[in-house]
Image (cartoon, rainbow, N blue to C red):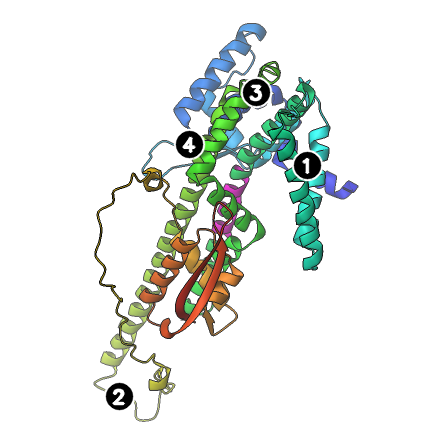
Amino acid sequence: MDFATLEALRLKHPAWRLLVADHAPFIASLLHQCFIESHARALPRAELASRLEALREGVRARRGDEAFPREASAYLDEWAADDAGWLRKFYPPGAEEPHFDLTPAAERAIRWLEQLTERPFLGTESRLLTVFQLVREMADGIEPDPAARVRELERRREALDAELARARAGRLERMEDAALKDRFQQLADTARGLMADFRALDEEFHALDRKARERIATWEGTRGELLEAVLGERDAISDSDPGRSFQAFWSFLMSPERQEALTHDLERVLAHPAVQSLEPDARLARVAFDWLEAGEHTQRTVARLSGQLRRFLDDRVWLENRRILQLLRGIERHALALRASPPGADFMALDGPALALELPLERPLFVPPSHARMEDAEALEAGEDVPSDALFSLTTVDKGRLKDNVRAVLRTREQVSLAEVVRAHPLQHGLAELVVYLGLASEDRRASIDDARTQDFLWSDASGRRRRATLPLVLFLR
């Protein structure tokens, strides 16, 4: 944070511009009320202008008609311009009215302003415990000695056994009100921070889209190289640390059991008198649903940008084909003009055409389809009651993510087995994910499934039980 860096931030960063703006209190209060307090991701122009107009009338009633003389829409356009950068103006698919969303920079500035206000409770214990826990997890994660890991797990088991014994004896250590308030304050801060992370992730994807379009517009190589570069850049984002972290967060949140457990626990915590004394935000009770909505918005943004990028590529290909046709027509016109009096000597040299050959041995050999083995067993009618909860505990496997996993491993190798793919990208949904991998292999004509050889896969399910599956050897080829 030297002088030059701070000087550049003061001149160029939207957050700094917002803090030093003449009407910063008015702008920050409106944006906080419309986007952060309500957890909204995008608002149409009419709704945002109406809320701005209501706030403007209230200020004018106290300060006179000279305050904020322009129309609400003029302020919105000014705040969305590059000179400000506090709002992002865009048109959702199929919408004729522009929408506005808060930019991550403006949200960061407003969050900082929030911290300046007096907090109802200032605790330090929970943050210190969080630091200790994070350090402990990282130390365990980088521990190369299995014996040390075993000793640590045994120590935790002994502590857990001791706690179980105290609980069975009726000796419970209840958390004091001060500690409860401390942890709830940190919970609320973290929950609000996650909403801000979604907006920052959206901006990162938009930056990727702009960068890809710039490369397409200035590309001078072949079309195949262009596609490989663009698709590789998408893989680089999904394989980046923020991309992997988001996918892990999304997979964790999509579990119905975890959503139900989180909602139930939050209701119990919010009903406690010590937490009620902090006057918590009522929307915190449904923060999991807000995270889901924000995550879906981010997923839709990625899908929309991918579609727009594909159409952009199609348009460029159409223009290239049109240019080739124009050149061919010109050659035909010149040839017709010279048909009556062709030149006597050589007048043009052409490179000899060459065909792209694919050798027969490079083609995959015919593989007879595998037949499922059916056991001749009589199906008996079930007599016992079977709980139907399992029918509603559906697991969603992202097929596109698994394709990306295979493509990422094949980036540096000619062929790779399914076990090697799973080793590089551990299973998140167990057997369901293995079934989808088999489906991908059956759809890919370059992939092979060898029933004569098998591979074992081990994983832990949601209850912590170790599971094992034996599958035919699956090979993916680049």
Q: Quadrant of residue 26?
A: top right
Left or right, 271 with respect to 350, comes to: right
Marking on residue 29: 3
Task: Give the Cα distance between marks 1 and 4.
Answer: 39 Å
**Which type of secondary structure does the marked residue at label 2 adopt?**
loop
Disc 3 crowd, CA 10 A, few/some/many (<14, 14-19, 20+): few
Residue at which label 1 appears: 130
**For residue 333, above or below residue 36:** below
Disc 1 crowd, CA 10 A, few/some/many (<14, 14-19, 20+): few
Tally the marks: 4
Give percent across and percent down for residue 432.
Answer: 38, 53
Residue at 59% across / 14% down in the picture? 273
Task: Give the Cα distance between marks 1 and 2.
Answer: 86 Å
Residue 207 colored in magenta in the image: yes
Which label sits in the foreground, 1 or 4? 1
Chain part drawn in magenta: 199-211
**Which type of secondary structure does the marked residue at label 4 adopt?**
strand
Q: Earlier in the sequence, mark 3 or mark 2?
A: 3
Q: Earlier in the sequence, mark 3 or mark 4?
A: 3
The prevailing secondary structure element of the residues shown in magenta is helix
**For residue 44, above or below residue 277:** below
Residue at which label 2 appears: 342
Task: Give the Cα distance between marks 3 and 4.
Answer: 19 Å
Residue 336 colored in magenta in the image: no
Residue at which label 4 appears: 99
Does the CB distance between marks 3 and 4 fall below 8 Å? no
Q: Earlier in the sequence, mark 1 or mark 4?
A: 4
